[in-house]
Image (cartoon, rainbow, N blue to C red):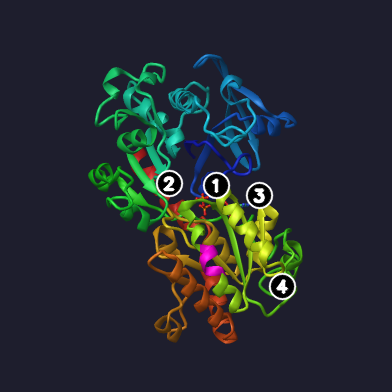
Amino acid sequence: MMQVLAVAPEVFPLVKTGGLADVVGALPHALAAHDVAVTTLLPGYRGVLAQLAGLPGVSLAWDAGAMFGGPARVLATRIAGLDVFVLDAPHLYDRPGGPYAGPDGVDWADNGLRFGALGAAADAIARGAIPGFSPAVVHAHDWQSGMAIARLHFGAAPRPATVFTVHNLAFQGQFDRGLLGQLGLPERAFSLDGVEHWGQIGFLKAGLALADRITTVSPTYAAEIRTPEAGMGLDGLLRARTRDLRGILNGIDTTIWDPARDPHLAAANPRGRARNKAALQARMGLDPDPGAPLFGVISRLSWQKGLDMLPEALPALLVAGGQLALLGSGDHGLEAAFRAAAAAHPGRIAAVFALDEPIAHLIQGGADAILVPSRFEPCGLTQLCALRYGAIPVVARTGGLADTVIDANVAALEQGQGTGIVFSPTNAPMLEAAILRTISLFHDRPVWKRLQHNAMRGDVSWARPAAAYASLYRDIAA
Ligand code: ADP
C-alpha cells in the first residue's frame, strides 16, 4: 500500500461548500482499488469537531503544542469510510460561520494564519510527526493547502513528493508579506519563483510554482488556464510549467449518486422519472404538469455560474411552456431576482435558497434538463450527476463542461450521438436559444429517449480518474 497525505479545507460529508469537498471525499475510496491509502488532513472547524464528538475511536495522533498563537493537536479517526487527521486548533477554527467566512459572509481576517497552520501541520505530518504514518506523496488541494507545498519545498530534504490540484483558479488566497516569518518560511521564499505574488504572499501561486506536479480537474481547463483570457494572472507561470501540468477529469461518487438506489427519490430512475418529476413539482410548488419541460438548476449563485443571464431567458422559457426549479445560494441580488420571478410566475418558476442535498437529488431525479451556463467551469459536477440520472445537461462550452457533454446537434443526432445541449458563446441570447432547442428536442420523444439513454450510458465514476491519479503518484514517488 502506498500512503498518501491529502490536504484540503473541505471534505464531504464532513464539511462542504462546493465541488472540492465532493472530490476530496470520493477520491480515497476509488484509490483504494489501486493500493493507495489516503489519509486526509482538514481543519477542525466547529461543525467537524461536533461530528467527531460522539464517535468511538478518535485518538490523539499528535500534540503540536503551540501553533500560530494557541494550542493545536491532530486527532485521527475513520469516519464515513475515510481516514482523516483533524487539526484541532480552537483559536483558529472554533467559530460560528463557514470555513472561510463568518456568519456575515465576510472572509475571516486571519485566513492567512488559519490556512498557514493547515500547511504547517501537513508539513510536520509529511515529515513523520505521526508514528507509523510516512506518506510517499502529499496531495494538496486549492489555495488553502498551498503552504503545505511551500513548506515542504523550502524545508530540509528528504521530503515526500508533492502534487497540487487547482479546482478553481479564481480563488487565490493573497496575504500580507509580513506573515512570511510566522508561516515558517525563509526570507528567500519571498521571490518570483517562490511564494511572492504581486507583492503579497500568494497561497495558490505557491502551490502552482512549487509542487512537483500540478493537476487541474479537466483537460480543457488545463489548456484554458494557460491563456491570458482564463489564466487569472497566473497563465505565464502555468505556461512555464506546462510539462508538469495535467488535466484529470473529476468523477462523481456513484454510491451517493445512484439513480437506481437513491433514498431521496420517490422512485428508482430511469423508470421512475415521471414519478420523481411529480414529486419534484409537488416539493417545489410547481404545477403538476407531466408534459411541461422542467428545467432544474443546482448551483452556487455567482458570476462564474452565469445564472445572472437566466432571468433574461425566462420569458422565452415560459412562452414555450417550460418550468424552472432552482436550488441555489450565494449572491443576494441574484436571489432577489429569482425570488421575484417565482412570485410573478407561481406554479411555473420555483426557487429554494439553501444548501440542500435532498432537493439536489430530487432535481437530478425529476427535472427533464439541468442548466449549467457557467462563464468558466474547471470541471463541474452537476452535469456529471445529471448525465448519470438521465436529466439532460444544457451547458456552456467551457472547461470541464466541454469535456463531458456531447452536443446533440443535427450531425450528432443523425449518428445516434449526443448527451446534452452545448452552447457558445456564453451570453443570454445563446442561453435562451439553447433552452428553446432543448424544449423542441424534449417534444420529439424518440430523440429525447435516445439522448437520455446516451447520457446514462457514459462512465462518470471515479474509476478512470483514480487510475490516472494512482499512476501520477507512482511516477513522482519513484
Ligand atoms: P462548484 O464547486 O464551483 O460550486 P461543482 O459543480 O464542481 O461547482 O460542484 C458543486 C457541487 O455542489 C455539486 O455536487 C452540486 O450538486 C452541489 N451544490 C451546489 N449548490 C447546491 C445547493 N444549493 N444545494 C445542494 N447542493 C448544491
- Answer left or right for 350 relative to 391: right
Secondary element type, mark 1: loop
Residue at (32, 29) in percent of width and height: 195
Is the CB–ligand 1 distance for label 3 below 8 Å? yes
What is the spatial separation of the Cα atoms under label 4 and label 2, in whole angstroms?
Answer: 36 Å
Q: Is residue 443 above or below residue 212?
A: below
CB of residue at label 2: within 8 Å of ligand 1? Answer: yes
Residue 173 drawn above or below residue 25: above
Query: How far is mark 2 from mark 3, CA to CA?
Result: 22 Å
Q: Which amino acid does label 3 sit on?
A: Ala
Q: Given contact means CB atoms under 8 Å apart, are the residues at marks 1 and 3 in contact?
A: no
Q: Is ligand 1 within 8 Å of the beta carbon of the residue shown at mark 1?
A: yes
Segment colored magenta: 310-314
- The tag earlier along the polypeptide, 1 or 3, is 1
Check disc 2 and report the residue beneath it.
Answer: 168
**Mark 1 residue crowding within 10 angstroms, few (<14) / some (14–19) / many (20+):** some
Q: Specify which label sits upstream in the sequence, 1 or 2.
A: 1
Residue at image point 45% right, 66% down: 428
Front: mark 2 or 3: 3
C-alpha gap between disc 3 and disc 4: 26 Å
Mark 4: few/some/many CA within 10 Å (<14, 14-19, 20+): some
Pinpoint residue 81: horizontal percent, then vertical percent: 63, 43
Residue at image mark 4: 272
Which amino acid type is marked by label 1? Gly
Name the main secondary structure of what is drawn in magenta: helix
- Between circles 3 and 4, the one closer to the viewer is 3
Q: Position of residue 152 (x, y in %)?
A: 37, 27
Q: Is residue 410 visible?
A: yes
Find out whether residue 101 is within the magenta segment: no
Q: Which residue is drawn at 64% across and 36% down?
A: 78
